[in-house]
Amino acid sequence: SRNLEIAERVKAVAGRMGRHPGEVAIAYVLRNPSVTGAIVGFRNETQVRELQGAVSLVLPDDEFEYLKA
């Protein structure tokens, strides 16, 4: 399905960048010019630590376009 394809693309980008897939997903959303913020839920402290890097993560243009495809 399309959702599984998107998840695989996010994992691939995360692997290439050495980041957590959640960071990549959040950074992708935040790069959208029509989005002013992302509401993210956490279940535990580990998830907070894993995803806090998304705020400073800048996706390169090629990776952003790959995720959009």
Image (tube, rainbow, N blue to C red):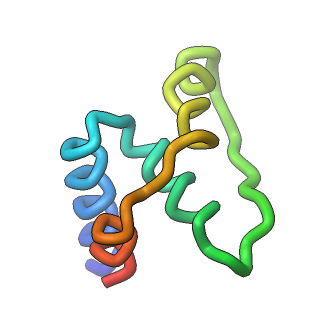
| Nearest to the observer: residue 44 or residue 16 | 16
* Image vertical order of residue 30 relative to residue 21, above or below: below
Q: Is residue 66 left or right of residue 36?
A: left
- What percent of the width, then of the height, locates residue 60? 37, 60
For the image shown, how many numbered marks are present on the structure? 0
In the current view of this chain or complex, which residue is farthest to the bottom? Answer: 69
Q: Residue drawn at (38%, 44%), measured in percent from left and top?
A: 21
| Residue drawn at x 55%, y 26% as measured from the top left | 47
Q: Residue at x 73, y 80 (%)?
A: 34
Q: Quadrant of residue 54?
A: top right
Nearer-the-camera pick, 28 or 21: 28
Residue occupying the far top of the picture: 45
Q: Position of residue 27 (x, y in %)?
A: 54, 54
Q: Quadrant of the N terminus?
A: bottom left
Query: Within the image, what quadrant is residue 19 found in?
Result: top left
Quadrant of the image containing the C terminus: bottom left
Extreme residue in the right direction? 36
**Spot occupied by residue 16 in the image (x, y as percentages of width and height):** 20, 46
Q: Residue at x 37, y 69 (%)?
A: 61
Left of 41 or right of it: where is 50?
A: left
Q: Nearer the viewer, residue 54 or 48?
A: 54
Residue 20 at x, y = what percent?
38, 36
Whether 50 is drawn above or below 1: the answer is: above
